[in-house]
């Protein structure tokens, strides 16, 4: 994740050799405590407004995605056209990657209205088209079961992330390493056509993105966690959670098909 979007709410202890103090009576004030800035999330109204804004944007994204996928799943002419023109699905991959890289890496664009909303809606529509193109190769029942399972898992993990005292934001580096391992394992799974290899791949992907979802929700909530998202980065927070849910859906669908 771009470092400028992530805030460390707690000041770090410095080396004792570089710490200066002024003694007034018996109290000691270090330079760290004197220069530490309060977290913007300490204002409860700012935190609540940020969370509400993220969930509104995320809900609109999911509704658009569901609507687009439904067209591909239940409209027979569209299904037949995609099956005969598979180039359409492959052409969407670079477009999706370009938009998500711009949103993830360009902070100024991410914070500029209405450019941030336009790019986010463009990414959502492209992602819906991509998922819809993939869904034509599955049965409608499998898509519905995967969507229902994803909804249950997402709600459960959201409640868990909000209630647990465990700080999953500290696992950012570990999850990134696991994601790299998952990508390498996916390349191996493309070569080795084995039922158990693909089953393990789908299960591992479901686990990793479940942990990512918990971590991103805790970073959005902020407050008592080690890392948090800047209150101005509501587009960034919504994008992270949306990508987690979409990846969960893909891997759960793969598990159901297996």
Image (tube, rainbow, N blue to C red):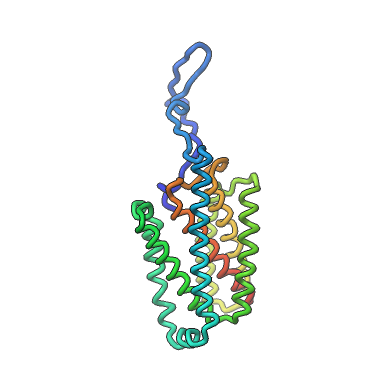
In the displayed structure, does residue 146 sit left or right of residue 127? right
Q: Quadrant of residue 154?
A: bottom right
In the displayed structure, does residue 40 sit left or right of residue 256? left
The residue depicted at 51 percent of the width and 75 percent of the height is 69
The residue depicted at 51 percent of the width and 77 percent of the height is 134
Which quadrant, please, contains the C terminus? bottom right
In the displayed structure, does residue 74 sit left or right of residue 127? right
Query: In terms of depth relative to the viewer, which is nearer, 114 or 95?
Result: 114
Query: In terms of depth relative to the viewer, which is nearer, 181 or 255?
Result: 255
The residue depicted at 45 percent of the width and 74 percent of the height is 129
What number of labels is visible? 0
Query: In terms of depth relative to the viewer, which is nearer, 15 or 88?
Result: 88
Q: In the orientation shown, which residue stands out farthest toward the top?
A: 25
x%, y% of residue 146? 61, 71
| Above/below status of 103 relative to 37 | below
The residue depicted at 42 percent of the width and 77 percent of the height is 90
| Above/below status of 155 relative to 88 | above
x%, y% of residue 216? 53, 53
x%, y% of residue 207? 61, 61
x%, y% of residue 186? 53, 70
């Amino acid at each position: 994740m771009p470092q400028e979007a992530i805030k460390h709410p707690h000041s770090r202890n410095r080396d004792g050799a570089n710490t200066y103090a002024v003694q007034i009576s018996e109290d000691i004030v270090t330079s760290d405590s004197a220069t530490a800035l309060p977290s913007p999330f300490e204002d409860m109204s700012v935190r609540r407004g940020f969370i509400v804004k993220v969930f509104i944007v995320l809900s609109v994204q999911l509704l658009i995605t569901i609507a687009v996928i439904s067209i591909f799943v239940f409209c027979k002419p569209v299904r037949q056209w995609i099956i005969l023109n598979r180039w359409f699905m492959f052409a969407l991959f670079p477009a999706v990657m370009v938009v998500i890289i711009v949103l993830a890496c360009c902070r100024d664009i991410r914070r500029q209205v209405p450019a941030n909303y336009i790019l986010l809606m463009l990414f959502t529509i492209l992602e819906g088209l991509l998922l819809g193109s993939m869904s034509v190769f599955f049965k409608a029942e499998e898509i519905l079961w995967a969507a229902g399972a994803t909804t249950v898992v997402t709600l459960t993990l959201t409640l868990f992330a909000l209630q647990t005292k465990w700080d999953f934001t500290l696992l950012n580096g570990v999850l990134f390493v696991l994601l790299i391992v998952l990508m390498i394992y996916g390349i191996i799974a493309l070569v080795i056509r084995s039922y158990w290899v693909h089953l393990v791949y789908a299960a591992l992907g479901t686990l990793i993105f479940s942990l990512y979802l918990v971590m991103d929700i805790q970073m959005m909530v902020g407050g008592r966690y080690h890392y948090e998202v800047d209150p101005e980065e509501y587009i960034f927070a919504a994008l992270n959670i949306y990508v987690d849910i979409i990846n969960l859906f893909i891997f759960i669908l793969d598990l159901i098909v297996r």
